[in-house]
Image (cartoon, rainbow, N blue to C red):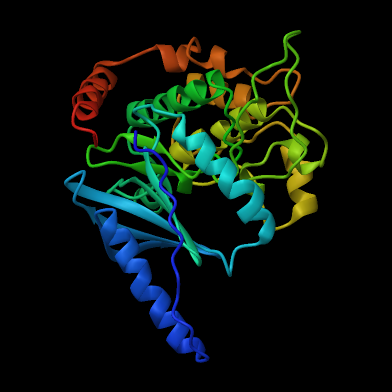
Amino acid sequence: MAAVHTEVGRSDNNSSEDAETASSDQHKLSVLENHGYILGKIIGTGSYATVKLARSDRHQDYVAVKIVSKFQAPTDYLTRFLPREIEVVKGLRHTNLIRFLQAVETTHRVYIIMEYAENGSLLDIIRKDTVIEEEPRAKNWFSQLRDALEYCHEHGVVHRDVKCENLLMNSNFDLKLSDFGFARGHMRPRSDGTPVLSETFCGSYAYASPEILKGIPYDPTLSDVWSMGVVLFAMVFGKLPFDDTNYNKLVRQVQSKVKFPTEPPISEQCKSLIGKLIAPLRIRAKITQIAKDPWVASKSAAQKTVDSTSSRAAATSIS
């Protein structure tokens, strides 16, 4: 894995704001070109970050470059969450995680270079297809998400923003967990087995566990599990289980038993698993228990074919 490189750019002194911006942009390109990256089109945008496609000479492949503006991003994000994100992703390596390649810093921006997933997000697929047409396919993607998160938790990392738009698909439609902007490391249980609790609200309302919505200290590993349940519900039903347009209504909904639509027809085993994930804290499944669940553990012939395809795809992942 590439080491982090930090370089400080300098813009020309000019009283014109436009001239400063132009100078900064020119220097930005030279900094990335010095590291072997040629920027291309925009493939994603946020409130203070843009993601662009880039060609990497070193990797002889396309990569994604997350560009964070130091002028637009909040101070708390720049001093707390962004350094934490870079620290976390540097230490992770799993076939179902978007791979971190390098970070470059200039006076005006921070660039995070990552593996590129060319088939968009799970949200894109759901919006296009409404639902995942075959339950075995949903099972495969959910199992890949479970593998990725269990790996993170084993390494003391909690994601805290698991949602459909953060689950990307590579050229072989293998799932890749991305965006560790709210992640936190050093979260292994204490020596007496008690969890390290979080107090920061992270993520999106629609995927947030009841304890997060209540604003109380929470076990982030179990909140990640709740979010997994919301993702699985969205995979098989093509919509989210809770209405996040009204906060008070949402708080009431998440404290009630999850309700399943009558269509499309989904197996009782799948519904049972969702009920174990989107569940009160005291009975919510732990991530280590999910692999033994009957729905996850059972594999049809179609599922085995999907797994075989995924295994072949792993051998061609970016190096």
The reply to whether residue 95 is visible in this rendering is yes
At which x and y percent is residue 315? 20, 26
Quadrant location of the N terminus? top left
Q: How many numbered badges does the structure rendering display?
A: 0
Image quadrant of residue 310? top left
Which residue shows up at 76% across the image and 8% down it? Answer: 192
Which residue shows up at 83% across the image and 36% down it? Answer: 216
Residue 99 in the figure: left or right of residue 163: left
At which x and y percent is residue 75? 67, 60
> Which one is nearer the viewer's eye here, 63 or 11?
11
Residue 232, above or below 285? below
Which residue shows up at 54% across the image and 25% down it? Answer: 271
Residue 204 in the figure: left or right of residue 97: right
Residue 91, above or below 55? above
At which x and y percent is residue 147? 44, 22
The reply to whether residue 243 is visible in this rendering is no
> Which one is nearer the viewer's eye here, 8 or 121?
8
> Which one is nearer the viewer's eye here, 214 or 40?
40
Outermost residue to the bottom? 16
Image quadrant of residue 102? top left
Residue 104 in the figure: left or right of residue 228: left
At which x and y percent is residue 297? 42, 12
> Which one is nearer the viewer's eye here, 123 or 40?
40
Residue 7 in the figure: left or right of residue 221: left
Quadrant location of the C terminus? top left
